[in-house]
Image: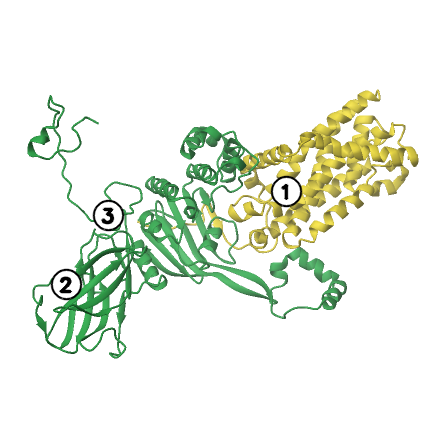
Amino acid sequence: MADIVINTNSIGKKYFIGEKLDGYKTLRETLTGVFSSPLKKAAKILRGRAEGASGLERAIWALKDVSFKVGQGEIVGIIGKNGSGKSTLLKILSRITEPTEGEILIKGRVGSLLEVGTGFHPELTGRENIYLNGAILGMKRKEISLKFDEIVAFSEVDEFIDTPVKRYSSGMYLRLAFAVAAHLDPEILLIDEVLAVGDARFQEKCLNKMNDIGKQGRTVIFVSHHMPAVMRLCDRSILIENGKLMDDGPSTRVVSSYLNASCGNMPEREWLDMSEAPGGDIVRLRAIRVITEDGQVSGTFDIGKTVGVELEYQVLKGGHILLPVLHFYNDEDILAFESNDIDPAWRRKQRPAGLWKSTVWIPGNFMSEGTIFITPAMVTLDPVNGQFHERKVVSFRVIENRKLDSARGDWPGKISSVVRPMLKWTTSFGPVNPQGRGVLNASGMQYGSGKNL
Amino acid sequence: MEKALSDETGILRIAPSRGWVALKLKEMWGYRELLYFLTWRDVKVRYKQTVLGAAWAIIQPFFTMVVFSLFFGRLAKMPSEGIPYPLFSYSALVPWTFFANGLNTGSNSLVSGSNLLQKIYFPRLIMPLATVFSGIVDFLLALAVLFAMMFYYGLTGTVNVVWLPCFLLLAFITSLGVALWLSAMNVQFRDVKYVIPFLTQIWLFATPIAYPSTLLHGVWRTLYGLNPMVGVVEGFRWALLGTNTAPGPMIIVSAAAALVLAVTGAFYFRRMEKTFADVV
């Protein structure tokens, strides 16, 4: 393991939320208070309210007893719900606010990025803001001058570099702001949710830039609740909940446990009371589960992993031909695909009464990233009759870890197709024949017109 | 192999501070470029959207001088130590305007820069410091008019003019001292916003701008120097116009008062600093 560069030890942060417990005071009380205790007031001003009025105001611990270590070159994601304390942690690490207790030791030049464009002034030109913002982020003037052209090129606003930024479109403004930030090169970089801004293309560009930063061996702490970004950038994640460190480990594990706990993914549904279960006199659904290859119920799958969906149903009246059906919807409510039971063992055969289980296996590298909702249905054949159809009773999430190979190949951008199957590609290479047609023509496979591109 | 972080040099330690804390002037020096850029921003921005631009730096003290000359000079026949009254009052208004503007913008610097406070770390002392610094540009413009007026009235000035920077420094320290106190208080108690105009107005008349300090004598005059602006104004008049107010015991009192104000202000500021980002 590498050298430890950040060591936080039992960090806690207490906030006074300013709500006095003794309720409202009358104006008279307030006035007499002012006149009767000017010395107390003066003392309060000198000490500051935080200490002066403690005991009267309600205090909350935004963070409590948070300890972790970060090694040189690690990229660590800090995740948690809004208000869980993750941003407070970042503010303490970047020295914007002091912890109430505990201690942090940091080795190396720290740069923090809590928003893009901190200190940008609308009246100043793009050029002036680059210098100002760079200085605020901790760059030296010489450093900014050296990187100036690079920053302008990255921002794609070169034409308007001498225009006040108040005339910029919001997109240009963000690009310029991010360009400055992206050229910050401290040894330790602390980043908060800066990707929450801008259009998809811009976010993609930011993510890629951050990926590059990570590859240069710098230590990065990345606070976000955008799970795909965390999965993509960070090998390790720390989960903060209610100000406490709940989990710390490989992103794949921490992110999935977080998603399972908080995002309402329901990978399992059971009906214990048969009279309540979907279905009728012939067949009723007892349970549906999304499972891993090992048969464990799970709500989050890596894009390369096989996903199993298990249907458990009670056949109440034997002698019918059953066809279990599953519909898979994505988060945009598009029916991504559907699957009908084709198991030859019981295909077109009458089934006796009893408890049945049918499982379908969806191969890895087939679905796209995102949440998948499953609608199970049961049909009896000859004649066709629907027995039950339960809309979106379970769901699971497909996440992509870009460190592993997938159908994405080397494309860094967004993939918006509904499915993302891993398909076989072949490549041939050969000289161009005099007719201008590729020699591959002979085999009947022609790609393009044969022109050399 | 894991190497533990020990408390060696080059390691930043973040821990809660209690009570009074060090000023960390060395760290401030490391951030001098930021101080430069923030000052430069203040100067640039101040005039970018104004019609009259830099002329404002002159208009403010100049018209105050016109008003003073009419009421105190012409009507009240205020003594002016043999100097034409407009020149007498303007020579005091130039450092005064620098002081008052520094006090005003400096005291509001943390509140108006609250976004910076909440988003990035740097030594907070830089914020009031940069705003007071940026007033020097205005000061120089107003000073140029003062030289033009001296030329107009046929005053050649004295060699004592070389001491002028010292008096400017005194005005700077005084302005910064007040700004440090008020800006830190302003974060928690917005009452300060209402105190500032009131304070500057009283302070204006407590300073020998419309009248000469020679109205006071002996030990009273020395004690008058407890208002550091008295030393500044009299110093300016002596250095530029050759009045009979050469630095004496009074200027020592003024300098001491200004230093006490600035040093206590800086410590108070540092003490309150840890709460800035949370309460601003």
Q: Which amino acid does label 2 sit on?
A: Asp
Q: How far apart are marks 2 and 3 (CA)?
A: 31 Å
Residue A341, label in figure: 2
**Which chain's colour is green?**
A
Percent across and percent down for residue A54 are 60, 64
Residue A100 versus residue B178 in the image, above or below: below
Front-most of B210 and A193?
A193
- Crowding near pointer 1: few (<14 within 10 Å), some, many (20+)? many
Residue at numbered disc 1: B128
The part of the image, by quadrant, that contains residue A157 is: top left
Please report the residue visible at 51 percent of the width from the left and 42 percent of the height from the top: A118
Residue A215 versus residue A39 in the image, above or below: above
Residue at numbered disc 3: A404
Q: What residue type is labelled 1?
A: Pro
The structure's colour scheme is by chain
2 or 3: tag closer to the N-terminus: 2
Q: Split into 4 quadrants, where in the image is the C terminus of chain A?
A: top left
Left or right? Give the position of B136 relative to A267.
right
Q: Are labels 2 and 3 on one chain?
A: yes
Q: What residue type is labelled 3?
A: Leu
Please report the residue visible at 85 percent of the width from the left and 35 percent of the height from the top: B68
Chain containing mark 3: A
Visual hue assigned to chain B = yellow
Could you tell me how many numbered marks the image carries?
Answer: 3
Chain containing mark 1: B
Residue lying farthest to the front in this orientation: A383
The part of the image, by quadrant, that contains residue B47 is: top right
